Image (tube, grey):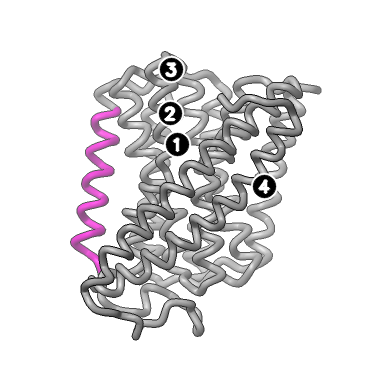
Amino acid sequence: MVQGGPVVQVAIVVGTVLGLWLGARTLVDAVVRLARRFGVPELTIGLTIVAMGTSTPELVVSADAALAGNGEIAVGNVVGSNVYNLAVVLGAASLLRVVPVERSLVHRDGVAALLATLVAFGALFDRTVTRGEGLLLGALFVGYTLYVLRDERTDASIDTEYPGARVSTADAPADSFRARDALALAGGLALVLLSGHFMVEAASSIARTAGVSEWVIGGTVVAAGTSTPELAVSFVAMRRGHIGMSVGNALGSNIFNVLGILGLASLLGPLAVGDAAIETLWWLTAITAATVGALWSGRRLSRPEGALLVVSELVRWTLGLLRIFG
């Protein structure tokens, strides 16, 4: 736990924001260079390595909660983070510029995100995720990841880049520079994760001082905090023209959260939840279906659609606070 008064906590939040953006810029550039040198599409990297890396805070929080026997925090963090990834990460990114996607991305990964959400909903419908259900969730995640890696495409169009992307395709120095890029990737990811960790600690401390309940903290403040790596990486990738990595990071993180993290957490201990978690899962299912539907119909996420997603998250937070303080 980070020590200090409210002023110190606010200063920590500001400092971690800077750390997130610096780490994200380093991470995105390193991933792009490594992906191009090894001939792996940026989308594939975003859906796998980057998505799992930026979901590490959710993994740590949910695993700790499962070991402590607090299923509501474990599940609430995952479900709340997934809502945040779609409503804020993708929604706010589309406010910067229209997000175009390839049909194959929607058909494969968008549908996979929706199906993964429905499978998790089915597991949680009886308010408990057993170890057997967790094993099934984990197996589905491994199967999906292997399928993505086998199905990786060399068609450059799937990266869906804007002209003027910061890292040129011609930027392919000799093999001796690969180690440096790998170190940059590891360093950028470490900075993002550490910044996200301290942001969660400081934000949670501020919320507790304000008298907000543990459930609201887990489903909103901690969920948003553990999603700050996805937000930082997706924003930087979008601004630097790497649309495939931005969209892939958000969708891949959601798939990893509901299959991989829930699966692992339930293996550590069965997860029991209450009605509040189910209500949030209904919300997640609706947001996921709406996002996939928007991408399916127009193969893009427009600014008005992104604005609606962001507003939906503001509504969710407001309803949660009204339930506590109303």
The residue at which mark 3 appears reads as 272
- Amino acid identity at mark 1: Glu
Q: Residues within 10 Å of mark 3 (few under 14, many from 20)?
A: many
Q: Is residue 120 magenta?
A: no
* Residue 145 colored in magenta in the image: yes
**Residue that badge 4 annotates:** 312
Say whether marks 3 and 4 touch (CB < 8 Å).
no
Q: Position of residue 190 (x, y in %)?
A: 42, 47
Question: In the depicted view, which residue is nearer to us: 35 or 1?
Answer: 1
- Whether residue 204 sits left or right of residue 290 in the image: it is right
Q: Which mark is residue 62?
A: 2
306 or 261: nearer the viewer: 261
Which residue sits at x=42%, y=67%?
A: 29
Q: Place residue 251 in its image quadrant.
A: bottom left
The answer to whether the residue labelled 4 contacts the one labelled 1, judged by CB atoms less than 8 Å apart, is: no
* Badge 3 amino acid: Ala
- Considering the whole magenta stretch, tell me its main secondary structure: helix
